[in-house]
Amino acid sequence: MAVDDDAAEPEVTTATADTAEYLSDQDGASRAWRRDPTKIALVGGLVAVIGVASLGGWIGVRAHQSRQLDQRQTTFVDVARQAATDLTTIDHREVEGDVKRILDSATGAFYDDFNNRAQPFIEVVKKTQSKSVGTVVSAGVESETDQDAQVLVAVSVKTTVADGTEQRPRSWRMRISVQRLGNEVKVSNVAFVP
């Protein structure tokens, strides 16, 4: 087998004077860039500004989300507190208005159930001539989503009957479900908690 001596040697190209000058300029420019403290400080400052701006933006977004969560929870708790007060503050002289107020803040199965029992409830309150005043002791969100929440409410209720006898205050705990319907939040369920 014959070996071709010319094929084994690599082809050598020579750089022209223009190419050498270009490479020399590039190498000098990169060395100058690396050595120029003003440019290094400028790049470092730019990186720092971008980092601080990104951190500030992230903190701003988190703060906004936190405010939205606080507002949503406050709304849910306020509606549940008012519902607990409405449910436990009933006066035989204004019972129809009290029942209407409860129904106006209700929705779903709770609305249907309370509406069906409203007339017998009104009759019992009038017959016993009772007056009860509920005071919310504490309330807090137990669980929530964007559209609804379960709120635990502790209520102290004072009741007076026809003969003027004031009964001992009773303490009740309620789990009140609230639901966002468009721009309103209404009570969707009430359960007494032992």
Image (cartoon, helix red, strand yellow):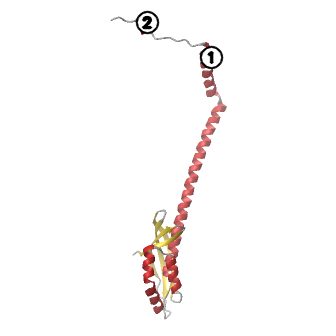
Quadrant housing the N terminus = top left
Give the camera-side residue of 3 and 128.
3
Vertical relation: 62 (above or below) 54: below
Vertical relation: 46 (above or below) 91: above
Quadrant housing the C terminus = bottom left
Vertical relation: 190 (above or below) 167: above
Q: Is residue 5 visible?
A: yes
Other residues around mark 1 within 10 Å, as few (<14) / some (14–19) / many (≥20): few
Vertical relation: 7 (above or below) 105: above
Give the camera-side residue of 194 and 43.
43
Q: Nearer the viewer, mark 2 or mark 1?
A: 2
Q: What percent of the width, then of the height, locates residue 35?
A: 63, 27
Residue underneath mark 1:
21
How many labels sit on residues? 2
Q: What percent of the width, then of the height, locates residue 118?
A: 45, 84
Residue at horizontal 63 percent and vertical 27 percent from the top: 33
On residue 113, the disc is none
Q: Looking at the picture, which amino acid does disc 1 mark?
A: Glu
Q: What percent of the width, then of the height, locates residue 162?
A: 49, 93
Q: What percent of the width, then of the height, locates residue 28?
A: 62, 21
Mark 2 touches mark 1? (CB < 8 Å): no
175 with respect to 46 (left or right): left
Q: Is residue 135 visible?
A: no
Q: Looking at the picture, which amino acid does disc 2 mark?
A: Asp
Residue underneath mark 2:
6
Question: Mark 2 to mark 1: distance in Å?
Answer: 31 Å
Give the camera-side residue of 151 and 126.
126
The single residue placed furthest to the bottom in the displayed view is 163
